[in-house]
Image (cartoon, rainbow, N blue to C red):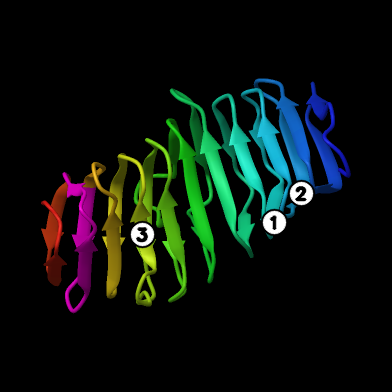
């Protein structure tokens, strides 16, 4: 798309071979229906979901945003290759049927007051690069996240608004920065031989399952 558009109305199971999103593009997939194929989102592009159907297409994002207005499922892969954001409206749930999203050396921001969900026991959002950042910029609930590659200084997980990470696995050295007046809740597992540095003037209000080392300069 080269300009903000009225978007796509999907009333039946459909396939789109290739869709490039460079502006605001609403997609309404009817309940019980699906859209397959391939979608690319670049910087400045917003893929906006306004209905409860299933997106089975793979989504490649070198930038831009997923903006979720209604609960829906994405069963295709989401491939991140740049700075992206995912916004979910209050009381809505975005479910990824894939086991993981790999951030690579990029920033992934979660916005809104809704829920980003993955299957039980999945990796969820995986920080698989030393320069990766997962930022909570809304009162969002994320069911699963994992740090699999040791974080560089100032990288890792940043909490700018009170939120929940239900299951956070810290498998290697990483950082968790919680902003002043903000609280992160949920459960965090720190693996043996891993160190989690918690900084900032906010509060960690979740459960810590500690086999490794904790370094904290904030309230726990």
Vertical comparison of 3 with 135: above or below: above
Q: Quick check: 197 left or right of 1?
A: left
Image height of 132 relative to 135, above or below: below
Helix, strand or loop under label 1: strand
Looking at the rendering, the stretch of residues picked out in magenta corresponds to 187-205
- Residue tagged by mark 1? 60
Q: Considering only vertical position in the picture, is 151 above or below 24?
A: below
Q: Earlier in the sequence, mark 2 or mark 1?
A: 2
Closer to the camera in the image, 21 or 4: 4
- The mark closer to the camera, 2 or 3, is 3
Residue 53 lies, in percent from the top left, at 65, 27
Q: Residue at x 36, y 70 (%)?
A: 154
Q: Secondary structure at mark 2?
A: strand
Query: Where, quadrant-wise, is the N terminus in this rendering?
Result: top right
Q: Is residue 77 left or right of residue 105?
A: right
2 and 1 marks in contact (CB < 8 Å): yes
Question: Can residue 171 be seen by looking at this rendering?
Answer: no
Secondary structure found at label 3 = strand
- Which mark is nearer the camera, 1 or 3? 3
């Amino acid at each position: 798309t080269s300009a903000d558009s009225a978007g796509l109305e999907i009333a039946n199971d459909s396939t789109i071979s290739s869709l490039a999103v460079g502006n605001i593009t609403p997609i309404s997939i009817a309940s019980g229906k699906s859209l397959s194929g391939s979608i690319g989102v670049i910087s400045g592009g917003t893929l906006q979901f306004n209905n409860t159907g299933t997106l089975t297409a793979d989504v490649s994002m070198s930038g831009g945003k997923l903006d979720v207005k209604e609960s829906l499922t994405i069963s295709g892969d989401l491939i991140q290759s740049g700075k992206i954001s995912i916004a979910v409206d209050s009381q809505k749930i975005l479910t990824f049927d894939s086991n993981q999203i790999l951030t690579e050396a990029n920033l992934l921001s979660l916005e809104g007051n809704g829920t980003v969900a993955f299957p039980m026991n999945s990796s969820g959002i995986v920080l698989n690069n030393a320069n990766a950042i997962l930022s909570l910029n809304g009162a969002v609930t994320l069911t699963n996240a994992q740090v699999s590659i040791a974080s560089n200084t100032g990288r890792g997980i940043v909490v700018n608004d009170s939120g929940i990470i239900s299951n956070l696995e810290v498998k290697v050295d990483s950082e968790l920065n919680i902003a002043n007046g903000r609280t992160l809740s949920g459960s965090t597992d720190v693996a043996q031989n891993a160190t989690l540095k918690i900084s900032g003037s906010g509060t960690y209000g979740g459960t810590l399952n500690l086999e490794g080392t904790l370094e904290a300069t904030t309230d726990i």
